[in-house]
Image (cartoon, rainbow, N blue to C red):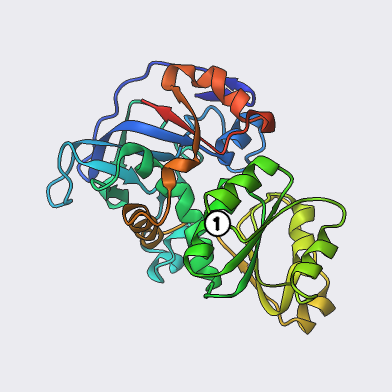
Amino acid sequence: MCLEPGKLVAQDRPEPVRAADEVLVRVRRVGVCGTDYHIFRGKQPYLSYPRLIGHEFSGEVIEAPGGSGLNPGDRVAVMPYLSCGVCVACRQGKTNCCTRLEVLGVHRDGALTEYVSIPAAFVVNTNSLDFDEAAMIEFLSIGAHAVRRAGVMSEERVLVVGAGPIGLAATAFAKLRGARVTIVDSRADRLEFARTVLSADHTIVLNEQIRTTLADLTQGEFFDIVFDATGNPQAMETGFSYVAHGGRYALISVVTADIRFSDPDFHKRETTLLACRNATLEDFSTVAEAIRSGQLPAKSFATHRAVLAEVPDRLPLWAEPASGVIKALVEI
């Protein structure tokens, strides 16, 4: 439990009681993500404390309702974005931007615990994957969703700004579509991962000459598609200038700030501006198949591990850039 910013504690609580339409899941792996670090630091604007955190997870079915297609012992991943199914977005299949969306670990208690009970509609059978791989699906699906939404095509020039797990996920799926991908970040270790594991075409350490470097790389034309995955308002605003004429700009990051851009530049490029929020079950399926087929080395993202009782001590350390974390997994 995160009782308040900066304070994590281990607690005993009753095992959840499964409702008729829910699946009781024994949690086995939980990925720790930027949202969890933001909650710990008091920088997540959409929740109230105390909160049981964790939303990237896999587990084992203990009980399931009849007709769900799930059976005790099945390995599963969980879609943590609980949508209503009836609002204007859900009726269009855009469950990721449901008007009543509740996210596990943010709006309601999450998965850093031994058992959870989840509506069956959000539980995905992953018997072909192991627990580590299944726990990676959620964050990878955010990158997959952004790439699908931006309509990345073969040979397009793609720029990813920010080499955190989400930026790396976008890099991976843009490469799977045959794009030529450049990724920019201040951390050389993450750029090395993008180059050696994900086959990014160009990796560039952020510096004061970055615009000149990107211009030289593209003969002054810049990029067909730019993805921002920084969570930094200034970087998000700067990214508009990296979009080629006729290009697309996809904001994966969300910040509590007004984002400003030059309207004349925006119009002369006829820029397409896209918000990319969360993911859908379609994206979960895309990621699971990419892992299953060997196209995506999901396990390579897991750089750090702990068991549940160690989380109050480990998570603050993982939150620091010096830790070198790409993805930390908690074993339960």
Q: Residue at x 62, y 33 (%)?
A: 324
Label tally: 1
* Residue 219 sits above or below residue 85 on the image: below
- Residue 11: tell me if it is visible: yes
Q: Is residue 187 left or right of residue 308?
A: right
Q: Is residue 217 left or right of residue 25?
A: right
Secondary structure beneath disc 1? loop
Quadrant of the image occupied by residue 280 = bottom left
Image quarter in which the C terminus is found? top left
Amino acid carrying label 1: it is Ser
Q: Nearer the viewer, residue 73 or 100?
A: 73
* Residue that badge 1 annotates: 199
In the image as oriented, which residue stretches furthest toward the right? 208
- Residue 100: tell me if it is visible: no
The location of residue 47, given as percent across then percent down, is 56, 38
In the image as oriented, which residue stretches furthest toward the front? 196
Q: Is residue 40 left or right of residue 99?
A: right
Q: Residue at x 33, y 58 (%)?
A: 289
The location of residue 195, given as percent across then percent down, is 60, 52
Disc 1 crowd rating (10 Å Cα; few below 14, some 14-19, many 20+) is some
Q: Nearer the viewer, residue 294 or 328?
A: 294
Q: Residue at x 56, y 62 (%)?
A: 276
Q: Residue at x 51, y 57 (%)?
A: 172
